[in-house]
């Protein structure tokens, strides 16, 4: 009868591997449509509340400005997410790699990943990634890497 190795076994620690990942990230049409739907519902709710018309116009304008700012931010998400030797890197556009470490919560849903992190300089980095931003194989690899190598 054989027994499985203990997780604390030195032999197991020598052969432990880290996930290697290199994914191209593109803007998401799913998040774009979701944001437009939320903004439209917010404006509809404002008008259904029977507020005075000037207040409804002002509130609707604020919702549309916020949605426009978020849409610009969604279009700007473009880059590469990679790992090497248990270190995570984000390269936005044509800039250099920013090494980061996880800080705070990590959301891992079947269609959405939210990574809260900090880079070496202490600056906050939040990556909101939808399933359509990565190739299907990269999406699966990312979910596995986040689940097991964090």
Image (cartoon, helix red, strand yellow):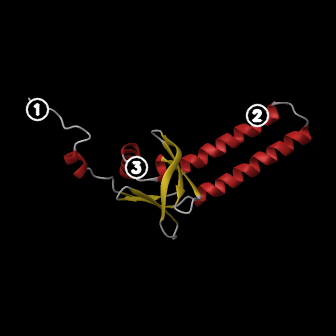
Question: Helix or strand or loop: what does disc 2 sit on?
Answer: helix
In the drawing, does residue 60 fall left or right of residue 142? right
Q: Is residue 15 visible?
A: no
Indicate the quadrant where residue 21 lies: bottom left
User: Separation of disc 3 and disc 2 at Cα?
Assistant: 37 Å
Q: Residues within 10 Å of mark 3 (few under 14, many from 20)?
A: many
Quick one: label 2 or label 1, which is nearer the N terminus?
1
Q: Nearer the viewer, residue 113 or 130?
A: 113
The disc, 1 or 3, on the residue closer to the chain's N-terminal end is: 1
Q: How many marks?
A: 3
Mark 3 / mark 2, whichever is N-terminal:
2
Find the distance from the CA under tag 1 to the CA under tag 3: 34 Å
Q: Residue at x 22, y 42 (%)?
A: 9
Seen at 65% across and 41% down, the residue is: 37
Whether residue 95 is situated above or below residue 80 in the rendered picture: below
Residue hosting label 1: 2
Which image quarter is the N terminus in?
A: top left
Estimate the spatial distance between the alpha carbons at disc 2 and disc 1, rounded to whole Å.
Answer: 64 Å
Secondary structure of the residue carrying tag 1 is loop
Where does the image place residue 108, in percent across and percent down from the top left?
Answer: 47, 41
**Side of 15 where 127 appears, left or right:** right
Q: Residue at x 50, y 43 (%)?
A: 106
**Which numbered disc, 2 or 1, marks the residue closer to the eye?**
1
- Label 1–label 3 contact, CB within 8 A: no
Q: Position of residue 61 (x, y in %)?
A: 81, 48
Tag 2 and tag 1, C-beta contact below 8 Å: no
Q: Residues within 10 Å of mark 1 (few under 14, many from 20)?
A: few
Q: Nearer the viewer, residue 30 or 126?
A: 126
Residue 111 is situated, as x and y percent measured from the top left of the image, at: 48, 41
The residue that mark 3 highlights is 142
Q: Which residue is mark 2?
A: 45
């Amino acid at each position: 009868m054989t027994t499985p190795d203990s997780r604390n076994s030195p032999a197991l620690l020598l052969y432990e591997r880290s996930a290697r990942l290199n994914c191209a990230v593109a803007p998401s049409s799913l998040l774009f449509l979701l944001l437009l739907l939320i903004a439209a519902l917010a404006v509809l709710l404002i008008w259904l509340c029977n507020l005075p018309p000037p207040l409804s116009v002002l509130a609707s304008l604020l919702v549309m400005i916020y949605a426009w700012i978020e849409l610009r931010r969604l279009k700007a998400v473009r880059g590469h997410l990679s790992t090497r030797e248990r270190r995570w890197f984000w390269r936005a556009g044509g800039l250099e790699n920013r090494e980061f470490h996880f800080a705070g919560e990590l959301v891992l849903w079947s269609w959405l990943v939210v990574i809260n992190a900090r880079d070496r300089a202490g600056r906050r980095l939040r990556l909101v990634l939808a399933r359509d931003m990565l190739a299907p194989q990269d999406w699966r690899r990312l979910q596995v890497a986040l689940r097991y190598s964090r």
